[in-house]
């Protein structure tokens, strides 16, 4: 498994109503790394992430997670993936703790392992003061923290985060950055994230999504975390 890329795409593309949104994306993302997608709003970052998560099917090409085609991924595969795409989801009638329990169960945790896992993310994300409050009463920032906690409660192998910092104050943004750096060294862990202000030093690669006005589509090019350009390596 270690030699298999955690995330790989081959000529990945998507059109909407005949308009090409993303095209020709070839990526290979290894375990134990943090990668970032950067680019202007509307460049195609979220569309690419949605294809990786099976939320949007590609029009061309293939996306693979943990060695298998996303379109054929089993519940076991999805149980090893955590994600937060734009707006955090929670059940408004459930408390913070109940939402985390539900997320853990949906991702395959056993009932015996749930209490420890939930206690851990409540402490890590500073949610103790709100754990018995319904999520509908939370501020936007606290809902974002709950969404992040739900994304990692099951200790996923792949963590995909999109625009996670926008609703967080500076203190909690620093806490999330610290968490990502802690997770970076874990065996069989890969983190793909957008909007990465403040954590560029901890990145392994920056994947820049750019809109090509001539073709009307977005493409991805890779650059080192220091900002210097390098040639993308296609997956064999």
Image (tube, grey):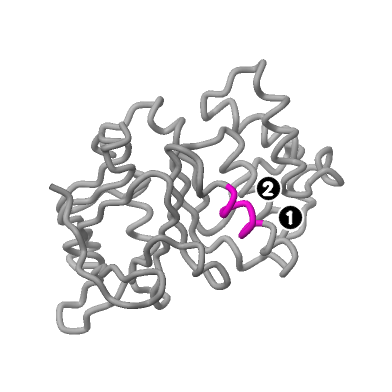
The N terminus: image quadrant? top left
State left or right for residue 196 relative to residue 68: right
Residue at position x 22%, y 72% in the image:
217
Observer-nearest of 57 and 153? 153
Residue 153 figure quarter: top right
Q: Is residue 49 magenta?
A: no
- Start-end of magenta stretch: 176-182
Residue 150, relative to residue 114: is it above or below? below
Residue 180 in magenta stretch? yes
Q: Residues within 10 Å of mark 2 (few under 14, many from 20)?
A: many
Residue nearest the viewer, comparing 133 with 24: 24
Q: Which residue is mark 1?
A: 142
Return the residue found at the far bottom. Answer: 213
Left or right of residue 204, residue 118 in this image: right
**What is the x, y in percent for residue 119?**
75, 33
Relative side of 137 to 211, left or right? right
**Rendering coords of residue 109 (x, y %):** 57, 23
Compared to 112, does 197 lie above or below?
below
The residue carrying pointer 1 sits among few (fewer than 14), some (14 to 19) or many (20 or more) residues within 10 Å by Cα, namely many
* Residue 146 tag number: 2
Check disc 2 and report its element: helix, strand or loop.
Answer: helix
């Amino acid at each position: 498994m270690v030699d298999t890329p955690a995330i790989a795409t081959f000529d990945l593309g998507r059109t909407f109503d005949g308009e090409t949104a993303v095209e020709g994306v070839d990526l290979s993302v290894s375990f134990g790394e943090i990668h970032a997608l950067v680019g202007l709003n509307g460049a195609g970052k979220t569309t690419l992430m949605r294809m990786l998560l099976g939320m949007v099917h590609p029009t061309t090409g293939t996306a693979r997670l943990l060695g298998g085609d996303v379109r054929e991924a089993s519940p076991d595969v999805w149980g090893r993936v955590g994600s937060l795409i734009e707006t955090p989801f929670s059940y408004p009638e459930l408390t913070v703790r109940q939402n985390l329990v539900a997320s853990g169960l949906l991702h395959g945790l056993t009932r015996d392992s749930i209490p420890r896992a939930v206690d851990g993310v409540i402490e890590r994300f500073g949610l103790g003061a709100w754990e018995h409050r319904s999520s509908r009463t939370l501020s936007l920032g606290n809902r974002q923290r709950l969404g992040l906690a739900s994304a990692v409660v099951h200790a996923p192998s792949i963590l995909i985060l999109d625009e996670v910092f926008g609703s967080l104050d500076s203190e909690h943004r620093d806490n999330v950055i610290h968490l990502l750096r802690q997770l970076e060294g874990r065996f069989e862990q890969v983190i793909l994230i957008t909007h990465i202000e403040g954590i560029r030093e901890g990145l392994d690669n920056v994947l820049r999504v750019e809109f090509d006005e001539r073709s009307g589509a977005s493409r991805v090019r890779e650059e080192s975390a220091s900002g210097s350009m390098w040639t993308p390596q296609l997956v064999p």
